[in-house]
Amino acid sequence: MSRPPLAREKVLDAFEQIMIDDGERAATLEATARAAGVSKGGLLYHFGTKEALELALVARLSVLVDEDIAAIITADEGPVAYFMRSSAMESSALDRVLIAVSRLAQGGNTHAVSALHDVRERWSNAIRPHVADETAHDLVMLVSDGLYYNNALAGSAVAGPVPTGPAMDALIKLVERATRT
Amino acid sequence: MSRPPLAREKVLDAFEQIMIDDGERAATLEATARAAGVSKGGLLYHFGTKEALELALVARLSVLVDEDIAAIITADEGPVAYFMRSSAMESSALDRVLIAVSRLAQGGNTHAVSALHDVRERWSNAIRPHVADETAHDLVMLVSDGLYYNNALAGSAVAGPVPTGPAMDALIKLVERATRT
DNA sequence: GTCTATAAAAAGATAGAC
DNA sequence: GTCTATCTTTTTATAGAC
């Protein structure tokens, strides 16, 4: 568990942020280096190629998903409510890397694609024991997908159409009533 | 209603397809021209800049959404069931352009972002009179978002299994029971 | 570890022939 | 309308100084 160099983390943070804000096209080595406060040469010392930078983002996702699955299973509010809320969250470390990696996946990065499939299957398995049947399971997964994709895909400058506050509480109640075991 | 030149449509089709399959980064003028079977110069006669090509895709979306809204409102099965089913439908002209434009939006194209907002709002307004309240409305919209995105992205990237046949019928029943006026 | 300088390729765009 | 040739800028990557 040796902690990675600070500059390396700053570069990866900057890359992630540009992917979220402006998409893969804008996330050039130059733009990433500038946002991280290093030179292009400095960036390339830590990540020898652009692909290495992308793979590091996928690796960051894996770590954060491990923690998330544990949190879902043990949530006080119950797995379904916790999962729905976290699908609509916009600024956790997991949400950020998830959006960034899904942009990579849309650009054709195969590691990103399979990492995202893996994440969805782990969520699916964590939720299944807590709903009545497969139809209820479909409903919970699809509502969460809707929440997540609206965040991930609808453009970043958008105050998305996803319910918040009391509207989210009401939605969770409705889904729980419809899917309860 | 003069029909646009054939080559122009072929170029726009090719651009749309590359955006869907490989993302904005791959959808260069060169790649688009090659896929359309014309030269870069030929492409640039029809679309003077890359932005013009992107705007033409957004315009194509507007036309197809007009038709879709009309179909939702008049559906025999009812707007909610029709909307859910069509969200899970694959590779209609509307689905294709919708995916392509959402990729543009992620790249920061402001016209694409506002066009997508407009589409979602029009769908939203078409559904609202047919559900009990705002929470029910959120549920229908989010399940449809989940269906649409999973289905739309199944080939290339992020995707989970979308219910079909009897599983879809059961899901529609569940949603209608939970949201009925 | 980080920098500057620079190469090599790819991208968007223009000019002019046909 | 469509092409080839060419220009400019951007992007990825390398080399070598500090």
Image (spheres, coloured by chain):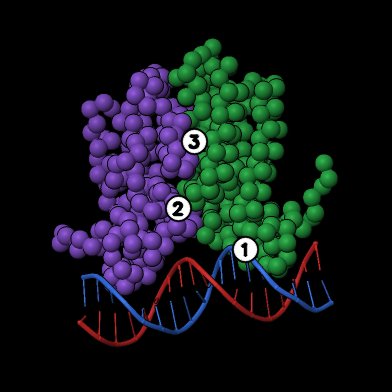
Chain colours: A purple, B green, C blue, D red
- Spot occupied by residue B105 in the image (x, y as percentages of width and height): 52, 46
| Crowdedness near tag 1: few (<14), some (14–19) or many (≥20) residues, C-alpha within 10 Å | many
Q: Residue at x 62, y 38 (%)?
A: B89
Labels 3 and 2 in the same subunit: no
Q: Decide: few, some or many residues near mark 2? Use Cα within 10 Å; few <14, some 14-19, many ≥20.
A: many
Q: Chain of mark 3?
A: B
Query: Does A4 appear above or below B159?
Result: below
The residue tagged 3 is B146
Q: Nearer the viewer, residue A144 or B45?
A: B45
Marks 3 and 1, how far apart at CA: 32 Å
Q: Callout 3, which amino acid?
A: Gly
Chain on which label 2 sits: A
Using the image, tell me which numbered label, if any, was put on residue A88. Answer: none
Which disc, if any, is residue A23? Answer: 2
B97, B1: nearer the viewer: B1
Q: Are marks 3 and 1 on the same chain?
A: yes
